[in-house]
Image: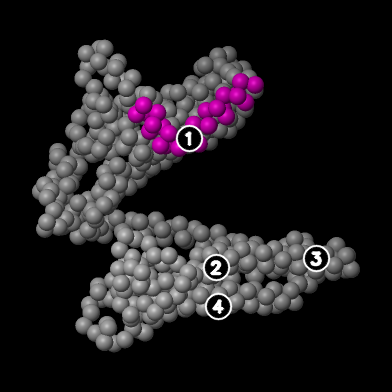
Amino acid sequence: MSVSGVPQTGPMATAGALRISHSPLRGQNVVGYSLLLIVILSLVAYYVGRGSARRFAGAAGGDKIHSLPGYHGAFIAVWVGIPAFVLVLLWASFQGAILDSLIVSSLPSAFTEGKSPAELNLVLSEIRNLASGRAFGAPAPEVEAAAARLVSWQHIASWAMVVVAATMMLLVLVYARTRIAPRFRARNNVERVLSGLMVFCSVVAILTTVGIIVSLLYESIAFFRLVPLHEFLFGLKWEPQIALRADQVAGAGAFGAIPVFTGTLLISVIALAVAIPIGLLTAIFLVEYADDRVRNVVKPIMEILAGIPTVVFGFFAVLTVAPAIREAGGLMGIATSPNSALAAGFVMGIMIIPFISSLSDDALRAVPRSMRDGSLAMGATPAETMTKVMLPAALPGIMGGILLAASRAIGETMIVVMAAGLIATLTLNPMDSVTTVTVQIVTLLIGDTSFDSPKTLAAFALGLVLFIVTLGLNVLALQIVKKYREQYE
């Protein structure tokens, strides 16, 4: 059985393997065109509603209509676009699972008899690969026939989604158009829909957070069944390389996370020690001492740092900062590792300067002008006004910027990988090579992973500890903010 159109891929593809022709509009392409159709018809609905409202508003007089024409157009647009958007998302989400179950049920019973669920999943994966044009070896005739059916059913289901969505939008457009009237409360209906959307987004954010916490807890509990909690929290050796298969050579594994936490803390402290003074002093200079011309030049240049990719900072650390630190250490007779915590922390500190300077600048400018003028009128110098009045009053915003910068430093991965290394070393010497929690999480989840081994599950335990530490930092910052807000409000 052969259908021409898609070339074979892979070194073991055979000439007799199935070749399936693909329409240029299928799969994700059809979903994309469906979303584009929703946008177009929503715009059409908006202009239809607004035009209708303008006509009866001109006939009845502006003082006799309840809502502006734009609200009438928005009312029709949201009722045309939102249900269709939800339909397309649900259809695209469940289409694959439904087609997979249909494909499995359509296979001959003699072909599926005696196969375990895992073996059926392998057969289904082969069918999907063959349907998408990736053929390896000579597939069975049943697999070829199932792949051809899958391609056909995908085309039918995708275009059925487009037809159903377009039909529903047209019907809703006609119905919503009949609701338009001079005294129709379009504004109230639109605001009610927008309020519902905001509540929905809030619920999604909360559920996402709960899902993250539950997944971290579940996998961490599985890890602590294999590795004792005290060994993880207080162990001094981190070597998670263990054998995942019987034929694999690896160590027995050691999961003492103290070296990882120490490296994270060391690099973060160095980064904050660089960023906090520079960022805060920059904000003070721009607010109190710089004129508008200097401010308009300096502040954009500082904020450009926030847009530089972290991999560029990593290259800068590897090619410039690390060699400079190594040479300086050699001149002073200090043993320096090729990859050091000082190089990673210094470059990371430069990267997070905009977070502190920009937010501190905004917080200082938000302090009431009367507080500054009153201090100066009492005879205080600008420096005394800044340290005794402005900084304490702006402390909530400044703490927010420092907390954001600290979170950014703790969560950074690329700079640490390139400039600090991957080996967990228990040291407080900034000239040594260290690693961080985020780097180890990435390392543990790359490659041949098995979610029943302590090596992989250790990533979730590290993530849980990182989450708890970050939560504690947030609580501490909120307490500081609350204290100073009560003093200055």
Where residue 139 sits: x, y (%)? 31, 74
What's under tag 4, amino acid-wise? Ala
Q: CA distance from mark 2 to mark 1?
A: 37 Å
SS at badge 1? loop
Residue at mark 2? 25
Q: Which residue is mark 3?
A: 51
N-terminal of the pair, mark 1 or mark 4, is 4
Mark 3 or mark 2: name the one nearer the start of the chain: 2
Left or right: where 245 falls relative to 125:
left
Name above or below for residue 208 compared with residue 291: below
State which mark lies toward you, 1 or 4. 4
Indicate yes or no whether the magenta region holds residue 295.
yes
Which disc is residue 308 wearing? 1
Amino acid on which disc 3 is placed: Gly
- Give the main secondary structure, helix, strand or loop, of the magenta stretch: helix
The front one of 152 and 232 is 152
Label 3 vs label 2: CA separation?
A: 34 Å
307 above or below 335? Answer: below
Q: What element does badge 4 sit on?
A: helix
Q: Is residue 479 visible?
A: no
Amino acid type at circle 2 is Leu
